[in-house]
Image (tube, coloured by chain):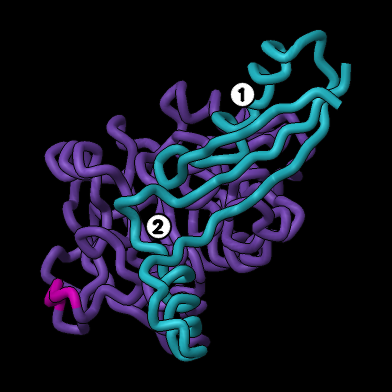
Chain colours: A cyan, B purple
Amino acid sequence: MKFRAEIDIMPLKEILDPQGKAVKLGLVNLGLNQVEDVRIGKHISLELEATDQEEAEGKVETACKKLLANLIMEGYTYKVTAL
Amino acid sequence: MKFGVVVFPGSNCDEDMIYVLQSIMKQEVVKLWHKDTDLQGCDFIVLPGGFSYGDYLRSGAIARFSPIMEKVIDHANNGGYLLGICNGFQILTEAGLLPGALLRNKDQKFICKNTYIKAANADSALTKNLNLDKAYKIPVAHAEGRYFASEAELKTIEENGQVLFRYSDENGNLDDTFNINGSLNNIAGVMNKNKNVFGMMPHPERAADNALANTDGKAIFDSILSYIG
């Protein structure tokens, strides 16, 4: 079976995100004073072959832990759906 | 002593490193291609600076899966000497051989300039010969050099004396003002607990030749040879 994983990787809350800070400044300059907190991460979309949902999630978990995210600085969430 | 300098696609400080080790320090040096799986009997491996694999995903993240890295990791785990400079340092943290991580600089900019660093202790191959009161002028060139580690890890690193260098001013003051990239505790370089794996963001190989009018970096290479040689 084919699955698609939609993965979000975000800098950990306690880490300063200078990119998010700079973008927030831009948004405020745009007149959007209501914007409070901007943090920037990555979105990774991938397709994979697995026998079932559980196996697909296990593979995505490994991918996130071992390569896609650096757990010292980032956290991840994902959603795996059958195609 | 035989040095091996690993070349990844995107490395750009490999030739500078080879030049310094060979022509200035008079050592035997070989280039190790990232697809190789043989360290050719090298005693000391160097991961040079650059933009391995275009810095895709995260700096150093992909390079650590290069075929040669399996042997490099074995070499380090068996007590062999391993030094990563700039992108090489990023690769070593990604590979888990050094603690912490290197984040985007505090001000978001790529910083390319001379900085001053101070050795944090003289108990390592890199710092053995250094004067602990002196600030060494060594250039940096990076966008992701902000050293970060969890609070617990940072405490361990400091307690074990694993910090090699800290950013300072020219007189060696460790004020936060001179912390060019926002690194925790001004950290510019660290080593592992066993003191055989080293990483630093500044480039000593760019400050080791008289022709460049700055040889502060040569003291680090002298240190290595006197410690190990």
| Badge nearest the viewer, 1 or 2 | 1
Q: Quadrant of the C terminus of chain B?
A: top left
Please identify the quarter of the rendering in which residue B204 is found: bottom left
Image point (18%, 36%), residue name: B156
Report the span colored magenta: B172-176
Q: CA distance from mark 1 to mark 2?
A: 29 Å
Image point (55%, 24%), residue name: B74
Disc number for residue B208: none
Q: Classify residue B50 as left or right of residue B179.
A: right
Would you place residue B71 above or below residue A56 in this image? below
Image point (46%, 68%), residue name: A20
Which chain is mark 2 on? B
Q: Which residue is mark 2?
A: B200
Amino acid tagged 1 = Thr
Residue A33 within the magenta-colored segment of the rendering: no
Q: Classify residue B181 as left or right of residue B174.
A: right
Which chain is mark 1 on? A
Amino acid tagged 2 = Met
Circle 2 packing at 10 Å, graded few (<14), some (14-19), many (20+), is many
Say which of A25 and B228 sits in front: A25
Q: Regarding mark 2 in the picture, which secondary structure is present there?
A: strand
Q: Which residue is mark 1?
A: A62
User: x%, y% of residue B57?
Assistant: 64, 51
| Magenta part, dominant SS | loop
Would you place residue B199 above or below residue B18 in this image? above
Q: Classify residue B44 as left or right of residue B169.
A: right
